[in-house]
Image (cartoon, rainbow, N blue to C red):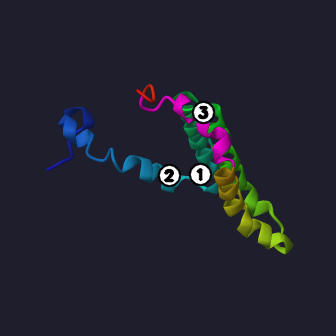
Amino acid sequence: MSELPEYRRPWWHRWAGLLGEPRRRWRGMDERERFQAGIVLRVVLLGVLVYATSWPLALLVVVIFSLQYAQQYIPDRYAWARRAAIPTLVLLVAVLYPFYNANLPDMRWLGAFPP
């Protein structure tokens, strides 16, 4: 029995591989395209954070993403800096928490807080 043309197949046959399509496209990309797609995805996430929360949180996410990309350019003789970059940033966020704690209710995740 021969394969039916796509316009003759039932609609659920056309949608059967939909969940695996992003994975197939990602695996079909080379390293440069994956790098560019990763940047685009991070920019979209940043836009959502700026809209849904506040700009200080978005700025923190930008710093984290920048550290992630900058770590590969740190020379080997400064390997200690590569290992200490993310923990230092987490420590900085924890120490500065009292200063930005007052602005946390401004985030628009679930509506007005406190009720």
Residue 103 is marked as 3
Q: Which residues are magenta?
A: 96-110
- Asked if one can make out residue 72 in the rendered structure from this viewpoint, the answer is yes
Label 1 near label 3: C-beta < 8 Å?
no
**Which residue has dot 1 on it?**
34
Circle 2 packing at 10 Å, graded few (<14), some (14-19), many (20+), is: few
- Which badge, 2 or 1, comes first in the chain's sequence? 2
C-alpha distance separating marks 2 and 3: 38 Å
Give the residue type at disc 2.
Trp
Residue sitting at x 75%, y 66%: 82
Is 102 in the magenta? Answer: yes
- Which badge, 3 or 1, comes first in the chain's sequence? 1
**Which residue has dot 2 on it?**
26
Residue sitting at x 59%, y 31%: 54
Label 1 near label 2: C-beta < 8 Å?
yes
| Residue 79 quadrant | bottom right
Name the quadrant of the C terminus.
top left
C-alpha distance separating marks 2 and 1: 7 Å
| Residue 70 quadrant | bottom right
- Which badge, 2 or 3, comes first in the chain's sequence? 2
Residue 46 position within the rendered picture, expressed as x and y whole percent measured from the top left:
60, 37
Q: Is residue 91 left or right of residue 5?
A: right
Give the residue type at disc 3.
Asn
Residue 40 position within the rendered picture, expressed as x and y whole percent measured from the top left:
60, 40
In the displayed structure, 8 sits above or below 41; it is above
C-alpha distance separating marks 3 and 1: 36 Å
Residue sitting at x 84%, y 68%: 75
